[in-house]
Amino acid sequence: MASLVYFRKVSESPESVEYLFGFDGDREARRLMMSTGTRRSLPVDGNIDYAFLKASRKINSLYGETDEWPEHGVSAS
């Protein structure tokens, strides 16, 4: 069974990037903050779970490939 976690960027500043993420590509319901300096992320709701880890890792992976914070994407496994 496939698992898809969608994400999209909602804001960006020199210090951080904020993303919405979730299992439904039309309604990403949760938020994560990514530090631009350290590339460490935190869930805004404090819940570190599978969906958060999948989104965070994919965002970091895409950033590592392009040196730009992705506008949107999906992690599939």
Image: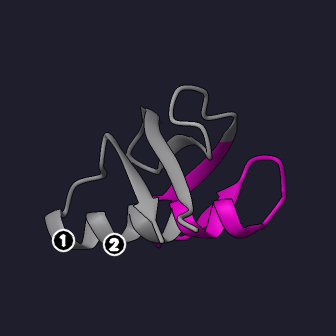
**Amino acid of disc 2:** Ser
Mark 1 residue element = helix
Q: Which residue is mark 1?
A: 65
Q: Is residue 4 left or right of residue 44?
A: left
What number is the disc on residue 16?
none
Residues at discs 2 and 1 in contact (Cβ within 8 Å): yes
The residue range painted magenta reads: 31-55
Q: Which residue is mark 2?
A: 61
Image quadrant occupied by the N terminus: bottom right
Q: Is residue 6 left or right of residue 53?
A: left
Q: Quadrant of residue 28?
A: top right
Asked if the magenta segment contains residue 50, the reply would be yes
How is this picture coloured?
A: one colour
Q: Say which residue appears at 69% left-offset and 34% top-offset.
A: 29
**Amino acid of disc 1:** Glu
Is 2 or 27 nearer to us in this picture?
2
